[in-house]
Amino acid sequence: MRTTIQFGPQHPVWIEPLRLKLIMDGEIVKDAELEAGYVHKGLEKKFEWDYNKGAYLSERVCAICTQHHSTCFCLAVEGTMNLEIPRRAQIIRTIMLELERLHSHFLAIGLTLESIGFENLFMLCFRNREIVLDVFERTTGNRILHGINIVGGVTRNIGPEMGKEILDFCDEIEKRSRDLEKMIVNSYTIRQRMQGVGIMSEKLAKDLCVVGPVARGSNVPYDVRAAAPYLMYKEVKVTPIIEKDGDCWARSIVRVRELYQSIDLIRQLVPMLEGTPDEIFAKPKSMPEGESFARVEPPRGELFYYVRGQKSIKLDRVKIRTSTYANGPGIIPLIKGSHLADVGLITITFDPCIGCFDR
Amino acid sequence: MLKILENIFKNATSKPYTSNYPFTPYQHFPGTRADVTWDGTKCTLCGLCQRVCPAECIVVHKEETKIEYMNTQCIRCGYCVRVCPTNAISQNEVYTKPSREKLTVFTLITNEDAPIIKKRRAEAAKKAAEGQPGETKKE
């Protein structure tokens, strides 16, 4: 007998609303249907205004990768004006991007553990995430919506004292992440629960064009930081971290290993601030004209902004392609044939951000 | 086994990680961007802050020489502070407590150099100058 189960829109696994219509045969999912659009805000239309305000608006698309969204928007608008931003601003932007990857991965790992019932480890992950947010508050002035990115540079400088503080923070967070890694990666129970669940083969990943840790967990070495370097990634080389298995465990391990990569990158970036001139803002000389696009690598995968200017302060069109939008179609083939108890775990290892999904 | 005992001892003797919230309030770091205030003696009522505000929470009433700031609507981006030509706007480090009502703050501008106030003063002076001779003529 077939039964239909409505998974969502309100489900404890996800923070945001997403609906899955599951057609079940006993415990096994036979068919699934994904429905999104519950938090559609119409932001792309709202972007057709002053481009200086657009940098603040782009942060509101997704509350977790705010810095990536505003950086990508600013890069796209700067592309339409042929504006080169100062080197110091580039370094500060890159440091913020890597810090944001840290806090987003802590959130993703914590939520994955919570979905399989380890609430204590979820709290430990969030305790570590809190000190990353403290660094954000000290450097940018706000915890989540930083608001330091503007078209032409950044608004706040990182002085030598703050640079030293960030390096101290790197030591602290690395020690804490090693502790956490010992607890999670060596745990027999977690490994048994997650290994072999929701396997995405390399061929499927390439067919569906998934991005980010989902692709890298399936042995597809695609990372925008390495494929099309932007900002300081031209100088600081990044090698994509890949895992071969393609199951939930591999996707989570990619995130854990990327934590250390981010810490390593911050350690390379902070000494670069020394000796660079104190200039952090270049005044735009012309209005946005023509079209341009930018790609960055948020914690969830590739993010794409397309901007078309009309030689006035107002923009003509902005198109956003977010990472969850690219990963969304990958959820359905993995759910088909899995147990009902695994549905939550499989979807949460994609790290879905529904605010990005619907825009 | 030994490791568990070690962990138990460590956790039993260490301080709690969380803070005792309502009794010890959360301390923001210096440089936090919070509420915005206007300096009435510096502002020239140019209206630039109203034009750049992304949240549209600033309304400049030129006739009443007042600035209306909707505190609960503000997103604390700091754009108005950056753009102000006379540095009349400052951002402090204290957040307003959450409230059920919309909170609106009015600031009265008393700057002598503000064009509108200057013009009014000149008009008043002119009127006074015209009025007095007129009165004397009537008499």
Image: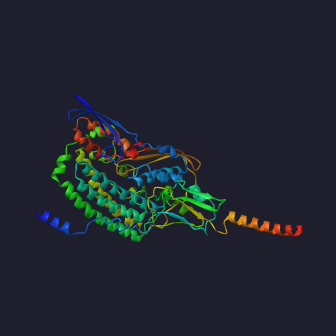
Q: Can you say whether A261 is above or below B16 in the image?
A: above
> From the image, which quarter does the C terminus of chain B lie in?
bottom right
Residue at 40% x, 52% y is A63
Number of numbered discs overlaid on the protein picture: 0
The x and y percentages for residue A105 are 31, 54
**Nearest the camera: B5 or A188?**
B5
The x and y percentages for residue B38 are 56, 65
In the rendered view, does A316 fall on the left or right side of A163?
right
In the rendered view, does A198 fall on the left or right side of A39?
left
Q: Can you say whether A342 is above or below B2 in the image?
A: above
**Nearest the camera: A99 or A11?**
A11
> From the image, which quarter does the N terminus of chain B lie in?
bottom left
The x and y percentages for residue A241 are 28, 51
**Nearest the camera: A41 or A300?**
A41
Is any atom of residue A338 visible in this view?
Answer: yes
The x and y percentages for residue A144 are 40, 57
In the rendered view, does A278 fall on the left or right side of A1?
right
Residue at 76% x, 64% y is B123
